[in-house]
Image (spheres, helix red, strand yellow):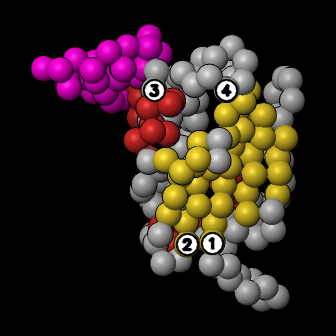
Amino acid sequence: MYLKSIEVQGFKSFANKILFEFHDGITGIVGPNGSGKSNVADAVRWVLGEQSAKQLRGSKMEDIIFSGTETRKPLGLAYVAITLDNKDHKLPIEYDEVTVARRVYRSGESEYLINGHSCRLKDVQELFLDTGIGKEGYSIIGQGQIDKILSGKPEDRRELFDEAAGIVKFKKRKAIAG
Ligand code: ATP
Ligand code: MG
C-alpha cells in the first residue's frame, strides 16, 4: 500500500484544484517559506479526520478554507482527496485503489467519502486502524512529535506500539464486547 496522489481544492493556500502525484521512491517538497509545503501535510491530516483546528495550525476549522488574497476572493468550500494503492489489500476493503475524501463548507456542513460513497468519520478511522496511517498513526510525524514520544508517559508510548503491532482493532472489539 502506498500513497498515489493528493488532490486539494480550496484547502488553505490551494485555491485552484491541484493534484500531487507520487511515484516509487522518496518525494521531497521544496519551496520558499510560506509557499504551502506544510499545508500539504495538513491536507493529509485533515482528510484522515483531524478535528482539531490547532493541529492544523489554525484557530477555527473555517481557517482551512481558502480565505482569499488581494487578487482572489475567498472560497466557500475546501476539498481534499487522497488515493492509496491497495493492491496488497492492507486496507480491509476489496478495492485495489482507495480514495478517501473530505469536504467542508463555510456553514460547517461536512462530508467524508470512501471511493465516492458518503460515509462517517468512524468509517474512515476504521479503514486505517492498525495501519499506522490514521490521524493518530505514526506515518505523519509532525515537528516536535519525536520529542513528545520520547518524553511521554509509557502508556502513551504503548499506544504507538499497539498500532504498529496491529492489535488496536482487537482491543477495541474487546472493549465493546466487555
Ligand atoms: P515554511 O517553509 O515557513 O515552513 P511552508 O511552505 O510550510 O513554509 P505553509 O505553512 O504550508 O508554508 O503555508 C503558509 C501559507 O499558507 C501562508 O502564506 C498562509 O497565508 C497560507 N494560508 C494558510 N491558510 C490559508 C487560507 N485559509 N487561505 C489562504 N491562504 C492560507
Ligand atoms: Mg512549513
Give the amino acid type for the residue marked by disc 2 in the picture. Tyr
Q: Which circle's residue, 2 or 3, is located before the other in the chain?
A: 2
Give the amino acid type for the residue marked by disc 4 in the picture. Tyr
Residue 29: name its quadrant: top right
Q: Residue 52 shows which numbered tag? A: none
**Spot occupied by residue 122 in the image (x, y as percentages of width and height):** 40, 41
Q: Which residue is mark 3?
A: 129
Q: Main secondary structure of the magenta part?
A: helix
Q: Residue 95 shows which numbered tag? A: 4
Q: Nearer the viewer, residue 15 or 31?
A: 15
Q: Which residue is mark 1?
A: 77
Q: Tell me: is circle 3 under 8 Å from ligand 1.
A: no
Q: Is residue 34 left or right of residue 71?
A: left
Please identify, in this view, whether the residue under mark 1 or under mark 4 is nearer the observer.
4
User: Distance from label 2 to label 3 (Cα)?
Assistant: 27 Å
- What residue span does the magenta drawing correspond to? 151-178
Q: Which residue is mark 2?
A: 105
Q: Which circle's residue, 4 or 3, is located before the other in the chain?
A: 4
